[in-house]
Image (spheres, rainbow, N blue to C red):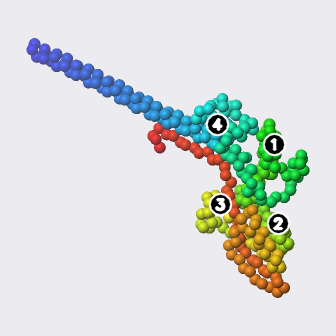
């Protein structure tokens, strides 16, 4: 009898142990799942926070770009609201309300620059003010620009400002493209104005050396061969006109020889310059939950 009681107690104890083990195992599983869900939840919160922060940074950068360029009037806060962007029309923006922006500085600064405007220019029918019969003054161009309404009229006013104000000098002095034909045409014009009819003008094939590129980021060189063989006075006048040209011609090497009949022969290798085109590049940022 005592033996049967002992066996019964052992069986009950063993069953109780099993129940405890099952309970502990079940609790461990629940705890593990809860911890995994908590970690996953924290990761999602962290990831979403990164995405929101990146979006806010992008919005702030776009707002700064719009404000700096002068596409729209400055926002009421630090960034543009949807309503402000919806109401913004670049063609109707008053320059007085975007002072300090790139657009205002170009139109009111560079376009009116007396030093740039002092560079001689040829009379173009497109730059003649019908009211005066003379070239447009800056004030006349500014009035046309300010009063332009509608996309077509604003585009025409902008083109008029670029072509007839001091802004026209900038692309002449430092073009934004490698145009060898335009370069040689400019040299040919200087030769003709000096009384010298060149037999031929050719590119010099100058390459970008470390010394040349170090002058300014984005600056490129374009070589050209100069050849003048004429009366000493004509040769000197040609060199003077090249020196006074709004476009830079950097003489790298030259050979000068006197010939019979007061003829001065001048052979040189020169370098002209042009800039890379400037454009806006959108960057892409990849955000991962791992933080890489």
Q: Is tag 4's residue or tag 3's residue first in the polypeptide sequence?
A: 4
- Mark 2 or 4, closer to the camera: 4
Callout 1 crowding tier (Cα within 10 Å): few <14, some 14–19, many ≥20: some
State the residue in front, 14 or 249. 249
Residue position marked by numbered label 2 in the rendering = 189
The residue tagged 3 is 219
Query: Helix or strand or loop: what does disc 1 sit on?
Result: helix
Q: In the rendered view, does 1 fall on the left or right side of 227?
A: left
Toward which corner of the image does residue 27 lie, by quadrant?
top left
Provide residue 118's location: percent of width, then percent of height.
Answer: 77, 58
Mark 2 or mark 1: which comes first in sequence?
1
Q: CA distance from mark 2 to mark 4?
A: 46 Å
In the image, is residue 104 above or below residue 274?
Answer: above
Circle 4 Cα neighbour tier, 10 Å, few/some/many (<14 / 14–19 / ≥20): many
Indicate left or right for 261 with 216 as reference.
right
Say which label, 2 or 4, has the lower sequence index. 4
The answer to whether mark 2 and mark 3 are in CB contact below 8 A is no
Q: Earlier in the sequence, mark 2 or mark 3?
A: 2
Q: Residue at x 45, y 40 (%)?
A: 290
Q: Position of residue 189 (x, y in %)?
A: 82, 66
Q: Is residue 270 visible?
A: yes
Q: Which residue is mark 4?
A: 74
Determine the CA span between mark 1 and mark 4: 24 Å
> Badge 3: how crowded within 10 Å, few (<14), some, or many (20+)?
some
User: As drawn, is 80 to the left or to the right of 261?
Assistant: left
Are discs 2 and 4 less than 8 Å apart at CB?
no
Displayed quadrant of residue 99: top right
The label number, if any, that marks residue 144 in the structure image: 1
Image position, residue 22 (x, y; %): 28, 23
């Amino acid at each position: 009898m005592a033996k049967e009681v002992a066996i019964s107690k052992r069986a009950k104890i063993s069953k109780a142990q099993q129940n405890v083990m099952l309970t502990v195992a079940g609790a461990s599983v629940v705890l593990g799942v809860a911890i995994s869900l908590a970690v996953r939840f924290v990761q999602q919160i962290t990831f979403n926070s990164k995405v929101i922060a990146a979006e806010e940074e992008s919005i702030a950068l776009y707002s700064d770009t719009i404000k700096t360029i002068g596409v729209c009037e400055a926002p009421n806060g630090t960034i543009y609201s949807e309503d402000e962007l919806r109401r913004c029309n670049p063609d109707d923006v008053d320059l007085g309300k975007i002072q300090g922006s790139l657009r205002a500085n170009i139109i009111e600064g560079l376009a009116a620059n007396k030093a740039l405007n002092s560079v001689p220019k040829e009379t173009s029918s497109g730059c003649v003010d019908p009211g005066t019969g003379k070239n447009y003054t800056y004030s006349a161009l500014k009035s046309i620009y300010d009063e332009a309404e509608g996309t077509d009229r604003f585009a025409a006013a902008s083109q008029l400002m670029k072509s007839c104000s001091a802004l026209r000098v900038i692309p002449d002095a430092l073009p934004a493209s490698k145009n060898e034909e335009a370069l040689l045409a400019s040299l040919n014009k200087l030769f003709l104005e000096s009384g010298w009819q060149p037999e031929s003008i050719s590119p010099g094939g100058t390459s970008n050396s470390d010394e040349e590129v170090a002058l300014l980021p984005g600056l490129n060189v374009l070589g050209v061969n100069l050849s003048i063989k004429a009366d000493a006075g004509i040769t000197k006048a040609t060199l003077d006109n090249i020196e006074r040209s709004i476009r830079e011609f950097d003489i790298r090497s030259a050979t000068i020889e006197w010939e019979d009949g007061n003829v001065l022969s001048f052979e040189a290798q020169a370098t002209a310059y042009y800039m890379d085109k400037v454009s806006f590049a959108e960057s892409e940022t990849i955000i991962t939950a791992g933080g890489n």
